[in-house]
Image: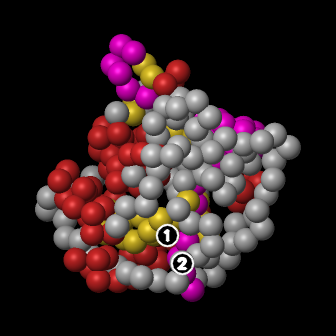
Amino acid sequence: MQEIIPSLRPLGYPRTYVRVPVDAQVSILKKILPYLDGEEVISRLPWNTPNGIDDFFVIPDDRRVGKSLAEATAFMLYYLGIDTKHVPLDELEREERTVQALRVMRRLYRGDFWLIPGQLGRFYAGVCVEKTRRNLEKNEFGLDFYLSAAALVTHPGRLTGESGELGIDCSGNADFNGNGSPKIPCLNSFLDYSVRRRRCLMRKVSEPDRSYGPATGFIPGMRF
């Protein structure tokens, strides 16, 4: 994987962001989704670790969480305290490479959870989504709004609202009507104080921003 260095020094991760054991992630998710079974992912670790990953993220299959992708995404965002009134959840679609990757995940895992090695922005910090997609590894794909939110539910230390903290570009979402893909900001300046929820926004996939980094995942052994 070729690391891309932007012209401006990008922001970074907070010190509170740490790896979480797979069984602990399953326990966190089962508190809000008690009907799901996590034994399969616990038994499947470890894989060979791809370079540049933050952690192995335990992600519930969105079809087990909601009747639609929008409903599943809204469910995860509720637990993160993220407001989505500026993001058209019902109209967001997954980028084709992400669709293909999750099709493979559903073949690999017959249970309720997937195990996705990934990173939440650091590796492509300051790089636009469009350029990131051109530089993905052969087994790498973008994490969409749902996948990024699910990873944050089990890794709450990733977004603390600190100055200098990197936001997340949901690079697994297709460009929506030229308005781009969703971004999850970190700074508390994005809090809507009327409801105490962090506001998400949309931005064009061709616009780089040193305050954000596209999130990606991997399927070991797969080539797109």
Which of 11 and 184 lies nearest the eye of the viewer?
11
Asked whether residue 21 appears in the rendered view, the answer is yes
Mark 1, residue position: 117
Q: Quadrant of residue 172?
A: bottom right
Q: Residues within 10 Å of mark 2 (few under 14, many from 20)?
A: some
Asked whether residue 91 appears in the rendered view, the answer is no
Span colored in magenta: 193-221
In the figure, is residue 133 to the left or right of 50? Answer: right
Mark 2, residue position: 49
The tag on residue 183 is: none
Residue type indicated by callout 2: Thr
In the figure, is residue 216 to the left or right of 115? Answer: right
Q: Is residue 94 inside the magenta stretch?
A: no
Q: Residue at x 19, y 70 (%)?
A: 37
Farthest residue toward the front? 15
Residue 7 horizontal/vertical position (percent)? 85, 43
As drawn, 129 above or below 103 = above
Farthest residue toward the left? 35
For the N terminus, which image quadrant?
Answer: bottom right
SS at mark 2? loop
